[in-house]
Image (cartoon, rainbow, N blue to C red):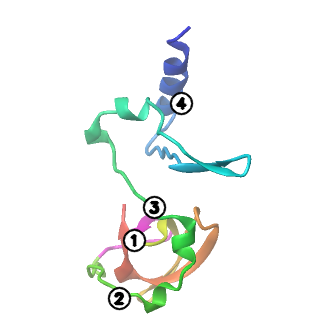
C-alpha cells in the first residue's frame, strides 16, 4: 500500500481549480519541545516550474517593531489592484485586499489572522 499516499496527494492537488496553496512548517512544538520538521517528500516531486515559493519569517520576527527598520522595497504603485486580489508583503506574507482608499490598502493576512493598512508600494500582486 505504499502507493496510497501518492493517490491521496494526487486527488488533493487535482481538486484545485485555479490556484493551490501548499504549506509546511520548519519547526513544531511537540509536547513542549521544539522539533525541526522536514517538508513532505511529495513537495519535492512537484516540477519546479510549477512552484512559486514564498518564505515567511517566524511569528516572533513579525512581532518586533518594524517601523524602526529601513524600508528598501521597490515602488510598485503602478499595479492595477482591486478588492479581492491576492498580494505578497515582504514581512507579513500572503494577503487579500479588502479595501482600497487612495494609495492605501486594507489587507487581511491569514498567517497573522489580522488586517493591516498598507501603502500600495509595499505589496506585490500575485
Q: Residue at x 56, y 67 (%)?
A: 59
Q: Position of residue 2 (x, y in %)?
A: 52, 11
Considering depth in this image, is 71 or 8 the residue closer to the camera? Answer: 71
Closest to the camera, between mark 4 and mark 2, is: 2
Give the Cα distance between marks 3 and 1: 8 Å
Give the Cα distance between marks 1 and 4: 29 Å
Region rendered in magenta: 79-89
The correct choice, above or below, for 53 with respect to 14 in the image is below
Image quadrant where residue 43 sits: top left
- Are the two marked residues, 1 and 2, in contact with CB atoms closer than 8 angstroms? no
Q: According to the image, label 4 marks what residue?
A: 12
Considering depth in this image, is 63 or 12 the residue closer to the camera? Answer: 63
Q: Residue at x 59, y 62 (%)?
A: 110
Q: Is residue 111 visible?
A: yes
Give the Cα distance between marks 4 and 2: 41 Å
- Are the two marked residues, 3 and 1, in contact with CB atoms closer than 8 angstroms? no
Q: According to the image, label 1 marks what residue?
A: 90
Q: Residue at x 58, y 62 (%)?
A: 111
Q: Label 2 neighbourhood size at 10 Å, few (<14), some (14-19), many (20+)?
A: few
Q: Label 4 neighbourhood size at 10 Å, few (<14), some (14-19), many (20+)?
A: few
Q: Earlier in the sequence, mark 3 or mark 4?
A: 4
Task: Provide the major secondary structure of the magenta segment.
Answer: loop
Closest to the camera, between mark 3 and mark 4, is: 3
Q: According to the image, label 2 marks what residue?
A: 70
> Is 57 a magenta residue?
no
Q: Position of residue 115 (x, y in %)?
A: 60, 75
Q: Is residue 84 visible?
A: no
Q: Quadrant of the N terminus?
A: top right
Give the Cα distance between marks 3 and 4: 24 Å
Q: According to the image, label 3 marks what residue?
A: 56
Amino acid at each position: 500500500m505504499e502507493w496510497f499516499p501518492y493517490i491521496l496527494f494526487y486527488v488533493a492537488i487535482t481538486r484545485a481549480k485555479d490556484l493551490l496553496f501548499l504549506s509546511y512548517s520548519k519547526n513544531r512544538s511537540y509536547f513542549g519541545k521544539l522539533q525541526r520538521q522536514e517538508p513532505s517528500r511529495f513537495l519535492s516531486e512537484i516540477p519546479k516550474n510549477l512552484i512559486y515559493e514564498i518564505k515567511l519569517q517566524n511569528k516572533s520576527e513579525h512581532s518586533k517593531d518594524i517601523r524602526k527598520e529601513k524600508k528598501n522595497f521597490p515602488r510598485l504603485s503602478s499595479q492595477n489592484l482591486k478588492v479581492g486580489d491576492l498580494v505578497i508583503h515582504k514581512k507579513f506574507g500572503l494577503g487579500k485586499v479588502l479595501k482600497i482608499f487612495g494609495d492605501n490598502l486594507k489587507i487581511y493576512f491569514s498567517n497573522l489572522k489580522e488586517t493591516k493598512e498598507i501603502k500600495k508600494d509595499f505589496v506585490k500582486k500575485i
